[in-house]
Image: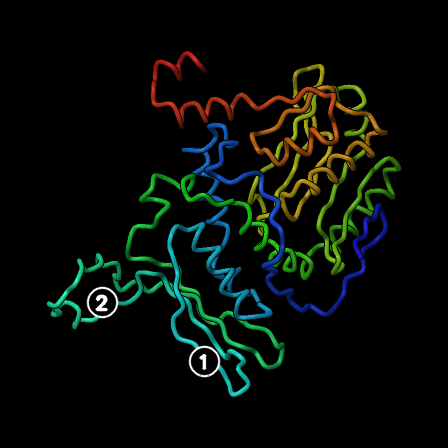
Amino acid sequence: MVKETQGGRLRMDGGGKRKSFDVDLEPECDRDIDSPESGGSSGGHQDEKAEELLGAIDMDDVMKLTFDTEEEAGEFYNLYAKLSGFKIRKSNGKRDADGISKFRKWVCYCEGYRDEKWFKYEDWKKEAKPITRTGNGACFRVKYDIESLNYVVTSFIVEHNHPLASEATGGYSNVGFCIKDLYNRMDEERRKDIFNGYVEGALGFLATKKDVDDMFFYKYHVDNEGRLARLVWADSKSQVDFSTFGDVLEFDMTYKTNKYRKPLVVFAGVNNHLNSTIFGCALLSDERIETYEWVLSTLIEAMDDRKPVVVMTDEDSTMQRAIKNLFPDPCHRLYSWHLHRNASSNILCKEFNDRFV
């Protein structure tokens, strides 16, 4: 059962069993990269973001995954391949007498070499297909674990000896695939690492802060497995500042600023001295609309239901939709820094960019 808790302590389960990869999970994507709704935000900036999210998936993450079925494992690798820019095919596998798959291996479409006999064959009735196999070694292999009754990853090789489609077609923006889908699913495993580490200590620290600051506010959200999914906190000074300077709210989110690559949200504004002031902070496990809505509603709860007049964000449309759902009246604006960067990335005209800035 999903729980939300304000204050108190979180009791952790000691099972530690990894959850299998859920291929039926509906991704909360802001849009397909190549959809018309992209509205020109594709290109250089989208490439940078895709590379950032793809780079956040390393071998350790993949080697920790478990799957209920062989099909789920194949779905995962196909998902990874689409985002990376290559095609896959099944390689060798084995089934027992009951028909249960003991292991399965998937390889890049360019794995191996064309059999030499086809080079010597002369009786062609139609033109031979172009040579696509380059001896590439990228692969993904799982085996059935009789103890856990799941499929575990035994091999994951990411190096390719040929250009990837994302590079050959001019960028990740042409892959036609939601770059956040794989990122959100991989986060499921990373979240468990956090709970095996410092979460209980962090919540204990926040509880101590509340003992010495009656106005200190913190609230967290726990998922179905009793694991931390969202956390928001704000001290008394932040609440007082928001009551005075909270007309304009800056919703700033950064990636991979901590060991676990969790999104860190900073709610900020400007005081009467034109200095930055912090209204609160949040740690998230994913970037879905419902997550943003929960964070924003929790912040307003901490601020005695006072809502901002203007909200400033980056160009993330998922975040923008969450703001529109919760705050239909406040004016929404984008950071000028993002606008300048996108202009210089997508419009190769120095004179225009100089005038735009």
Coordinates of residue 183 in the picture (x, y in percent): 55, 50
Quickly name the residue at label 1: 94
The quarter of the rendered structure image containing the N terminus is: bottom right
232 lies above or below 62: above
Task: Name the one closer to the observer, 94 or 221.
Answer: 94
Coordinates of residue 264 in the picture (x, y in percent): 63, 41
Horizontal placement of 7 versus 136: left or right? Answer: right
Q: Quadrant of residue 193?
A: bottom right
Task: Name the one closer to the observer, 157 or 206.
Answer: 157
Disc marking residue 305: none
Helix or strand or loop: what does disc 2 sit on? loop
99 lies above or below 25: below
Q: Are marks 1 and 2 in contact (CB under 8 Å)?
A: no
Amino acid identity at mark 2: Arg
Q: Crowding near pointer 1: few (<14 within 10 Å), some, many (20+)?
A: few
Q: Quadrant of residue 191?
A: bottom right
Q: Please tell me which residue is depicted at 46% across the width and 73% down the height of the picture.
A: 104
As drawn, which residue projects farthest toward the bottom? 97
177 lies above or below 94: above
Q: Earlier in the sequence, mark 1 or mark 2?
A: 1
Quickly name the residue at label 2: 114
Q: Crowding near pointer 2: few (<14 within 10 Å), some, many (20+)?
A: some
Amino acid identity at mark 1: Lys
Q: Please tell me which residue is depicted at 58% across the width and 43% down the height of the picture.
A: 29
Coordinates of residue 75 in the picture (x, y in percent): 51, 61
